[in-house]
Image: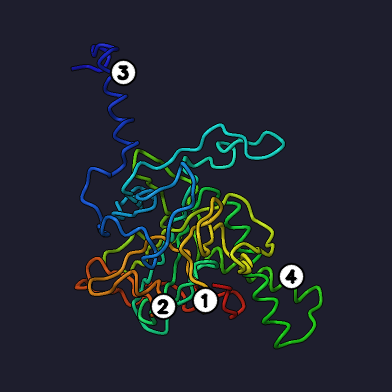
Amino acid sequence: MPLRSVPPRFLSLLLLAVLASACRGTRGATPLFSLEDPRGDDHGDGELSYPLREDLGPGAMDLLSLRAWPESGGTRFEATFARPIASPTARTVDGVGTTLVDQARLGFYTFNLDVYVDQDRREGSGSTDTLPGRRLVLAPGSAWEKAILLSPRPLEARDSLRALWREAALAEAQRTQGSLGGPALKALEAEVERRIDASVFFPTRANVTGARVSFFVPESFLGGPASASWGYAVAVTGAVLTRRVSMPAFLWGVAAPPEQGVMVLGIGPGVSHERFGGGRVGGAPQSPVVDLMVPEGVRQEDVLGPEAPPWPAVVPDASLPQAPDAGGAAGQGEAPGGAAPPG
C-alpha cells in the first residue's frame, strides 16, 4: 500500500507504538542477569531500626532484586524494593523555600544504592574499600574496578566524594612528601578527578515506578554491557540530601562519630528521627548499611556485625569465562593517590 494512501490516524498510532517501544528499550528482552535478595532483611546487623519518620519503615529499603538489561549505548539496571519508593513532595526543607522536589529531581530521596563491580575477579586487583561512610571492606577476591552510586543528588554526591578523596590523598601526600606547593596540589586534585571519572559513576538518568527504580549506566564507563560473569556487591543505605557539619552529640552519654560519608544517613544507639537506631556502643565504627546482597552460605548479619568479616560479591553466573582484559587498567578502583579513602 502506498504510504500516502495510509490513513493519518493509522500513521499516528504506528508512530506512537514505535516511540513507546523505543522508550521501553530492551526491557522486554531476557535480562543480562538477575540477582535476588531475601525479603525482610532490611535490618542491617539484625539490630538496626528505621528512623522515627513517616516516610520510612520496614520494607522501605528492603532490596529484593537487581536486574540488568542491554540498552543502546549501555546497560539499564533495575532495583526492586519490598515497598513502593517514597516520592519527593513539595514540602519546604529550608528557610528560602527549597522543596524536597527541588532537591531530589530523580524521583526518590530516602536511599542510596551502591553497586561495586568486580570485572576481573582476580584477588589483588582493584579496591576492597567501599565508598566513604559505608564502613565495609570487600573480600580480596571481590575487589572492585568500577562502582556505581545511585543517589538522590548525584552531582552533590560526586562533590562529596571528591572532597573526601582529596582530603585522604592530601593527608597521604603530606605524610610522605611533607609540604606541597601549588603545582603539586593541582596535580593531586587532577589525579582525584581522574580516578573518580574512571572508577565511580553517578547515574543521572533514573525512573521510579512503584517499588522499582531503573537507572542507566553507559558502556563508556563499564567498557561494554554488564556481564553475568562479573561480581556484584550491592548495598542500600539511607540518604541525606545535604552535607552536614559534624557536631558532638550528648544524648545517651555517647559522642556521635564525625560524619565522613557520601550522602549517607548514620546509625547510633537508641532511637532517633535523624538517623538509624539500634547502633552498638563502643568497638569499631558500625556500618549504617540497611540491606546488602551476599552469596549463598554468607549471612548479612555477620558481615554487618561486630566481627565484620570481608564482604564477598555475588557472581550471577560464575561458570562463564572471564575475559582476560576485563576491568580495564589495573588500579582504577584504588583510592586517589594510593591512599585509602575513609570508609
Secondary structure of the residue carrying numbered label 2:
loop
Few, some or many residues within 10 Å of mark 4 (<14, 14–19, 20+): few
Which residue matches tag 4? 186
Sequence order check, earlier mark of 2 and 4 = 4
Few, some or many residues within 10 Å of mark 1 (<14, 14–19, 20+): many
Sequence order check, earlier mark of 3 and 1 = 3
Sequence order check, earlier mark of 4 and 3 = 3
Looking at the rendered structure, which numbered label has been put on residue 12? Answer: 3
Looking at the rendered structure, which numbered label has been put on residue 293? Answer: none
Quote the CA–CA distance across marks 2 and 1: 21 Å
Secondary structure of the residue carrying numbered label 4:
helix
Residue 98: x and y in percent read 65, 36
Residue drawn where x is 18% and y is 17% of the image: 1
Quote the CA–CA distance across marks 3 and 2: 59 Å
Sequence order check, earlier mark of 3 and 2 = 3
Q: Amino acid at mark 2?
A: Ala
Residue drawn where x is 57% and y is 78% of the image: 340
Dot in front, 2 or 1: 2
In the rendered structure, the answer to whether residue 111 lies left or right of residue 159 reads left
Asked whether disc 3 touches disc 2, contact meaning CB atoms under 8 Å apart, the reply is no
Residue 27: x and y in percent read 27, 44
In the rendered structure, the answer to whether residue 256 lies left or right of residue 44 reads right
